């Protein structure tokens, strides 16, 4: 839920229409804040975006990799060693059956000396202060500061195993590739069983055009945990770069045994065959892939379209994109791809992966996407930064880093990355980058800058709704309801009236804005129109139903609507509170208590719900419990203008219900 958008203005209870149905007239102006709470529902409505979030396939893949929180912890955490990208890599002694191309006596030929691994050694002196500063930055998700502090700590205490791990991990997360590689080289010499440095060194070798060294680093890594997917894919690309196509495809086989990963692994197999020039093998692998269905994620779709055009199957590629678009809202990258294929055929399709190095980076990026669906945001950033280090032109990886930083609420850092993305000749990437910049500025409370960017995007992209809807959302959260409604109106004018999937969320948002601005007739019309388009939508049912209860209108239908919303969202504390408060307004206090107690269980930190429960307790004679709930509401930092009334209730309780009130 988004933040409270402010107390409802100018919307009192309608006494004349409420008496006959038992509306409690003692629900005075403090009750108006409950409408502000209902307005929070608008923040949770799914608006069809111009970019689709990662699909379920990546979520399933992440789950199958069994990444526990410990597995995504930070390197050097004593409670969960090995950490950081735990399971990412673990250097083992080189296997006697290492493939041709693995360095004999090279980087991975020797196991590190176990006697040098002293993970219990903690920093001291000046290093301790820098280390603690790094830990503070780490827990604030400030990657750049953490990297600098851990690097400084290591400089003050060279050879410290814990500091080595933290330094190269956070240096890599901060995009300081060469510095991270330098520390990693020391780490593989100093530390036994190191879990990440070999992967970093393999990536450095691929970047520098030394695939034999990359194979040498990758071959000994145990393929378990996340490496059950990552190690085979990276090894395959490294072997391809040595000229060994058969060995590359063979390297993928262990990962194909993972049902959830098989589609992704097979995609990389097709890419490997395609890049090698073996179009016949690529075509056969492509046919086998498509027999299992089309891609369900945007990036694999783009790659499959490229591969189909390489096979001369452009019409089939276009059909695939059109079918994807027909399933619902899709990323602008996909709709832009469809437009280019329609207009230019195969010439409109970019060659996204043309070398083994680019394929290696793609594997890191795909794995980062999978990790990012769970609790591994820091690991996802490391993998995507590594992809960008291997292929500096991989702008999609940079966008992935920015998206992950947004998830971590590191908006300044995200904007730094976004401003460095080269969007030349890629209008879809340019649009998404500019939209993210505006949204991040909004999160940073740089409201005027955000509004200016939304306006500019809305002007240059008249076919896109997001800039206008985002602008409306910003204005609504700022209690600028009339301006918000105007922004939503412009968006609505751009939507095909037959496109209910896109239209109803904007109608709902505009209805909330009208209601908050005191224009009930317009609000009601929008809610009813939205409900016609999406009859069982719980947010609409809840907001409109509660509004009618609050106004003493359409009582029976209103109660039924809120009940249906609760049936669909039984664990949504705000909606359950709506039903409980509706019962309260009707004078059905015992039923109100039941629902409001459940709402408090679901949302114990919400002052409004606690206050509602206190009122209901008072009406059923549970005076001590009522005062406890009001005290609780005050402790949860309610809106300032509601504090005096809650304090008054603590002093004198509620006035008796007037005649006809129950």
Image: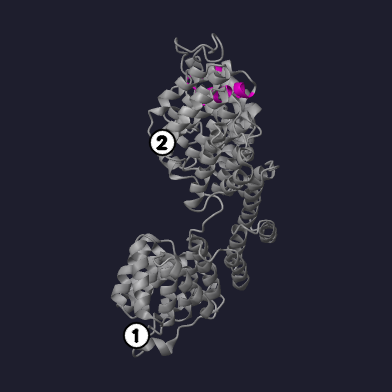
The answer to whether any part of residue 246 appears in the image is yes
- Residue 47: x percent and y percent? 51, 59
Query: Foreground: 504 or 234?
Result: 504
Q: Is residue 385 left or right of residue 549?
A: right
- Residue 292: x percent and y percent? 40, 37
Q: Main secondary structure of the magenta part?
A: helix
Query: In the rendered image, which residue does mark 2 sit on?
Result: 291
Query: Foreground: 425 or 400?
Result: 425
- Residue 554: x percent and y percent? 39, 81
Query: Foreground: 235 or 277?
Result: 277
Q: Quadrant of the C terminus?
A: bottom left
- Residue 609: x percent and y percent? 41, 68
Question: Is 294 covered by the magenta stretch?
Answer: no
The reply to whether discs 2 and 1 touch (Cβ–Cβ < 8 Å) is no
Query: Foreground: 213 or 459?
Result: 459
Give the residues in magenta.
189-207
For label 2, the crowd category at 10 Å Cα-Cα, with few meaning under 14, some 14 to 19 and many 20 or more, is: few
* Colour style of the rendered protein structure: one colour
Q: CA distance from mark 2 to mark 1?
A: 62 Å
Q: Is residue 569 above or below residue 379?
A: below
Quadrant of the image occupied by residue 156? top right
Question: Is 204 covered by the magenta stretch?
Answer: yes
Mark sitting on residue 21 = 1
Q: Is residue 341 above or below residue 580?
A: above
| Secondary structure found at label 1 | helix
């Amino acid at each position: 839920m988004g933040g409270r958008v402010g107390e409802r203005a100018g919307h009192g209870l309608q006494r004349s229409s409420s008496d006959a149905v038992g509306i409690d007239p003692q629900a005075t102006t403090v009750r108006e804040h409950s409408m502000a709470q209902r307005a929070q529902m608008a923040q949770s409505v799914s608006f069809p975006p111009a970019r689709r979030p990662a699909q379920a396939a990546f979520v399933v893949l992440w789950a199958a990799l069994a990444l526990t929180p410990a597995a995504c912890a930070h390197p050097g955490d004593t409670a969960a060693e090995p950490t950081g990208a735990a399971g990412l890599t673990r250097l083992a002694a080189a296997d006697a059956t290492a493939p041709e191309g693995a360095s004999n006596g090279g980087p991975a030929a020797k196991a590190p000396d176990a006697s040098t691994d002293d993970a219990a050694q903690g920093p001291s002196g000046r290093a301790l202060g820098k280390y603690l500063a790094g830990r503070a930055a780490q827990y604030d998700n400030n990657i750049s500061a953490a990297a600098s502090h851990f690097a400084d700590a290591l400089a003050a205490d060279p050879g410290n195993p814990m500091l080595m791990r933290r330094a190269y991990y956070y240096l890599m997360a901060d995009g300081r590739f060469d510095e991270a590689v330098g520390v990693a080289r020391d780490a593989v010499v100093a530390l036994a069983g190191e879990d990440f440095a070999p992967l970093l060194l393999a990536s450095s070798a691929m970047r520098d055009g030394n695939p034999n060294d990359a194979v040498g680093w990758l071959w000994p890594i145990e393929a378990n945990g996340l490496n059950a997917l990552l190690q085979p894919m990276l090894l395959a690309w490294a072997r391809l770069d040595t000229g060994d196509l058969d060995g590359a495809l063979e390297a993928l086989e262990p990962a194909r045994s993972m049902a959830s990963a098989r589609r992704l692994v097979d995609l990389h197999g097709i890419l490997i065959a395609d890049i090698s020039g073996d179009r016949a093998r690529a075509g056969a692998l492509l046919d086998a892939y498509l027999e299992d269905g089309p891609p369900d994620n945007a990036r694999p779709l783009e790659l499959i379209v490229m591969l189909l055009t390489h096979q001369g199957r452009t019409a089939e590629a276009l059909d695939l994109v059109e079918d994807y678009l027909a399933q619902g809202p899709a990323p602008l990258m996909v709709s832009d791809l469809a437009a280019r294929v329609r207009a230019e055929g195969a010439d409109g399709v970019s060659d996204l992966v043309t070398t083994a190095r680019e394929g290696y980076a793609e594997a890191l990026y795909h794995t980062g996407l999978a990790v990012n669906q769970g609790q591994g945001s820091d690991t996802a950033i490391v993998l995507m930064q590594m992809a960008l280090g291997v292929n500096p032109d991989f702008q999609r990886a940079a966008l992935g880093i920015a998206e992950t930083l947004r998830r971590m609420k590191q908006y300044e850092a995200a904007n730094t990355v976004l401003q460095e993305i080269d969007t030349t000749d890629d209008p879809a990437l340019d649009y998404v980058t500019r939209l993210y910049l505006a949204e991040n500025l909004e999160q940073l409370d740089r409201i005027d800058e955000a509004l200016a960017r939304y306006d500019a995007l809305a002007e240059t992209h008249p076919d896109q709704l997001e800039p206008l809807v985002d602008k409306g959302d910003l204005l609504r959260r700022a209690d600028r309801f009339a301006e918000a409604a105007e922004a939503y109106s412009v968006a609505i004018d751009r939507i095909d009236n037959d496109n209910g999937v896109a239209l109803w969320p904007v109608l709902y948002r505009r209805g909330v804005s009208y209601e908050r601005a005191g224009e009930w007739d317009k609000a009601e019309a929008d809610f009813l129109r939205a409900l016609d388009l999406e009859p069982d939508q719980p947010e609409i049912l809840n907001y409109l139903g509660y509004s009618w209860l609050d106004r003493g209108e359409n009582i029976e239908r209103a109660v039924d609507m809120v009940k249906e919303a609760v049936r669909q969202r039984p664990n949504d504390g705000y909606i359950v509170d709506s039903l409980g408060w509706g019962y309260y307004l009707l004078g059905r206090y015992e039923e109100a208590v039941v629902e409001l107690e459940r709402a408090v269980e679901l949302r114990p930190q919400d002052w409004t719900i606690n206050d509602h429960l206190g009122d209901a307790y008072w009406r059923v004679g549970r005076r001590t419990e009522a005062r406890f709930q009001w005290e609780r509401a005050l402790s949860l930092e309610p809106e300032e203008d509601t504090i005096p009334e809650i304090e008054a209730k603590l002093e004198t309780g509620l006035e008796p219900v007037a005649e006809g009130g129950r």
